[in-house]
Image (tube, rainbow, N blue to C red):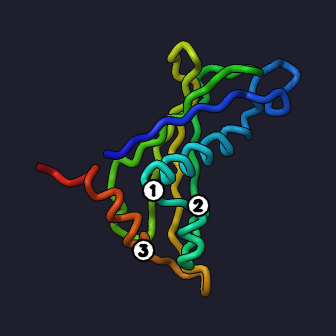
């Protein structure tokens, strides 16, 4: 399993009149988590796009447990529980507040697609090689 955590501070514009993070903003928080998760491996979405592969979101499940508020420092934990074997990659994500309380959970599925024809593709070999050490069994 591979996991990575990154933190962001809730901006005023991300909250509603009740001083609670608007539910739709969690999709952006999850994206920040995924991008930084990949970056920590020494790979980037930009590099993947340069290789002719895009990763659209095809499914997302979210469970809201507790609210986040303006100026909270939240931590987005992103996990890959399985090494992708086909055109699909599934990220499991959790958002915590500064006190370590779990606020939100999510599961986001993306496809690897070829930029030229929008057909399903496999994970770029460079990304696969970066992930393999986290999934190899001793």
Residue 58 got which mark? 2
Q: Nearer the viewer, mark 1 or mark 3?
A: 1
x then y, percent, for residue 131: 34, 56
Please state if 134 lies on the left or on the right of 90 as rendered: left
* Disc 2 crowd, CA 10 A, few/some/many (<14, 14-19, 20+): few
- Secondary structure under badge 1? loop
User: Which residue occupies the extreme left position in the image?
Assistant: 138
Disc with the residue nearer the chain's start (2 vs 3): 2
Q: Residue at x 45, y 54 (%)?
A: 90
Disc with the residue nearer the chain's start (1 vs 3): 1
Quadrant in the rendering for residue 126? bottom left
Please state if 72 lies on the left or on the right of 44 as rendered: right
Q: Residue at x 62, y 45 (%)?
A: 32
Q: Is residue 2 above or below residue 71?
A: below
Q: Residue at x 56, y 29 (%)?
A: 75
* Disc 3 crowd, CA 10 A, few/some/many (<14, 14-19, 20+): some
x then y, percent, for residue 47: 55, 68
Give the CA distance from mark 1 to mark 2: 25 Å
Q: Is residue 42 above or below residue 32?
A: below
Q: Nearer the viewer, mark 1 or mark 2?
A: 1
User: Which residue occupies the extreme bottom position in the image?
Assistant: 117
x then y, percent, for residue 28: 68, 44
Residue 18 got which mark? none
User: Disc 2 vs disc 3: Cβ atoms closer than 8 Å?
Assistant: no
x then y, percent, for residue 68: 68, 22
Q: Residue at x 66, y 44 (%)?
A: 27
Residue assigned mark 1: 42
Q: Is residue 58 above or below residue 103?
A: below
Residue assigned mark 3: 122
Give the CA distance from mark 2 to mark 3: 15 Å
């Amino acid at each position: 399993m591979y996991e990575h955590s990154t933190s962001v501070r809730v901006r005023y514009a991300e909250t509603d009149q009740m001083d609670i993070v608007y539910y739709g903003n969690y999709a952006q928080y999850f994206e920040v988590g995924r991008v930084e998760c990949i970056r920590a491996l020494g790979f980037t979405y930009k590099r993947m796009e340069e290789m002719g592969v895009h990763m659209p979101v095809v499914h997302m499940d979210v469970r809201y447990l507790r609210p986040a508020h303006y100026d909270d420092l939240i931590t987005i934990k992103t996990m890959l529980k399985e090494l992708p074997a086909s055109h699909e990659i599934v990220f499991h994500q959790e958002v915590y507040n500064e006190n370590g309380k779990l606020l939100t959970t999510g599961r986001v599925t993306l496809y690897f697609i070829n930029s030229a024809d929008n057909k399903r593709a496999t994970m770029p070999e460079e990304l696969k090689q970066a992930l393999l050490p986290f999934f190899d069994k001793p």
